[in-house]
Amino acid sequence: MVRKKIHHPIPPWAARAYIAFSLILLPWSIYLGTSLPRYHLSAHWDVSWTGLDIGIIVALLLTGLFAYLKSHWIIISASTVGSLLFVDAWFDVMSERRGLQLHEAVFLAIFIEIPLALTSYHIAYKVLKNEL
């Protein structure tokens, strides 16, 4: 049985953008892993944040790969990206003290993390809608 190739409504820029985001986030994660204090309000504060960023990098990279391959697996990876970015934005903002670092966290949440999360959910929704 020959399977008919289904047109996926994945934007043509998605593969390059998600792979680029994962590559941009990699040095940031390395920086955080080496610069964050080992103890904050909890032990292994540095490992917790670095681990979350590594999860985001993997999800971004997979979403870019699945976009390139026009794979239906992008539904899961893009949804994962959206969820991880919302979690990251929430904890970035909630865990910062007042001042410049809080302003930076709010700025990144509003202008990068939340828009990319919503874009990821939108891509997953469009592909899922096309699959049904």
Image (spheres, grey):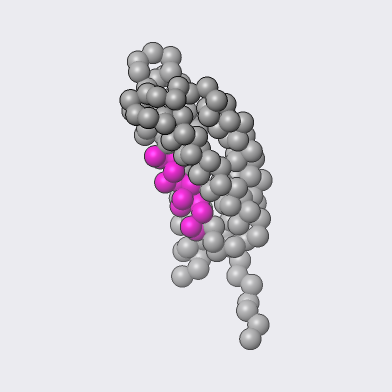
- Image vertical order of residue 116 relative to residue 28, above or below: below
Quarter location, residue 24: top right
* Nearer to us in this view, 114 or 55: 55
- Residue 97 horizontal/vertical position (percent): 35, 18
- In percent of the image, x 50 and y 52: which residue is there? 78
- In percent of the image, x 54 and y 61: which residue is there? 73
Say whether residue 81 is visible. yes
* Nearer to us in this view, 39 or 115: 39
Magenta stretch contains residue 80 = yes
- Which stretch appears magenta? 75-87
- Image vertical order of residue 26 relative to residue 101, above or below: below
Say whether residue 113 is visible. no
- In percent of the image, x 63 and y 86: which residue is there? 1
- Image vertical order of residue 85 relative to residue 76, above or below: above
Quarter location, residue 114: top left
Q: Is residue 57 left or right of residue 109?
A: right
Secondary structure mainly formed by the magenta segment = helix
Residue that sits furthest to the top in the current view = 99
- Residue 23 horizontal/vertical position (percent): 64, 38
- In percent of the image, x 53 and y 29: which residue is there? 33
What is the number of callouts on the image? Answer: 0
Magenta stretch contains residue 85 = yes
- Residue 53 horizontal/vertical position (percent): 50, 37
Q: Is residue 111 left or right of residue 12?
A: left
